[in-house]
Image: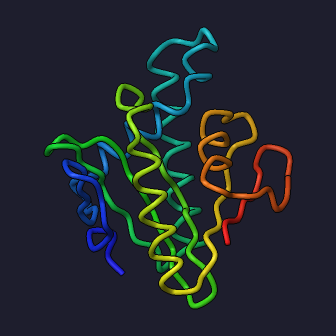
Amino acid sequence: MMLSELNLPIGLSVKAANTTDDPFMAQLFYSTKTLFYELGLPSEVVEIMLEQQYRLQQASYREQYPNANSYILFYHQQAVGKVILDISEYRIHLVDFIIIPSMRGRGFGSAILAAIKQEATKRHLPVGLSVESENTQAKKLYLQHGFKLESYSGAYESMLWR
């Protein structure tokens, strides 16, 4: 399945990510790590730490989800987020999902989740994800979309939608 085949609201579109999208995807990652900026460290040190964290995350994703597909989300041709999906015969796993901070709260996350759930329903598959325990905004969105807490492992909570 290509995410671009999903039924999305007018103005919202997706394309498969490629290597030229990596700087944008890295910036999205950095936007979720505001704690690093609050440490009082020189900005050069923070940038190095964030770059290392991003590289580690991407390597982990490649190892855990070698068949995952990455997509860039657009709203009227402006890149507004990313989604990484791993689809198997057993489930759809939402590996990563970020909307740029300035575009949050506009229904993009709900639209993407609804489209993924629609595809999962067609395939008779559950949708799984893992969310940082402290990310209350994302957890609220997932709960509103019917995801249930499956397990808790300190920094992360696993959620499932059936």
Farthest residue in the top direction?
40
- Judged left or right of residue 24, residue 126 is right
Count all numbered tags in the image, as a single digit: 0
Whole-percent x, y for residue 96 in the image: 52, 55
- Identify whether 40 is placed above or below 15: above
Question: Which residue is the extreme one toward the bottom?
Answer: 89
Viewport quadrant of the N terminus: bottom left
Q: Residue 39 vs residue 80: left or right?
A: right
Task: State whether residue 58 is above or below residue 99.
Answer: below
Nearer the observer, 55 or 3? 3
Quarter of the image where one finds residue 133:
top right
In the displayed structure, does residue 55 sit left or right of residue 126? left
Q: Quadrant of the C terminus?
A: bottom right
> What residue is drawn where x is 19% and y is 48%?
11
Indicate the quadrant where residue 72 lies.
bottom left
**Image position, residue 126 (x, y; %):** 64, 76
Can you say whether 47 is above or below 74 in the image? above
**In the rendered image, the vertical position of residue 53 relative to residue 39, given as above or below:** below
- Please state the horizontal and vertical placement of residue 6, each as a whole percent of the image: 32, 70
At a point 37% along the width and 36% down the height, the residue shown is 27
Q: Nearer the viewer, residue 16 or 128?
A: 128
Q: Residue at image x 57%, y 91%?
A: 89
Q: Residue at x 32, y 76 (%)?
A: 2
Image colouring? rainbow
Image x and y of residue 74, in percent: 24, 48
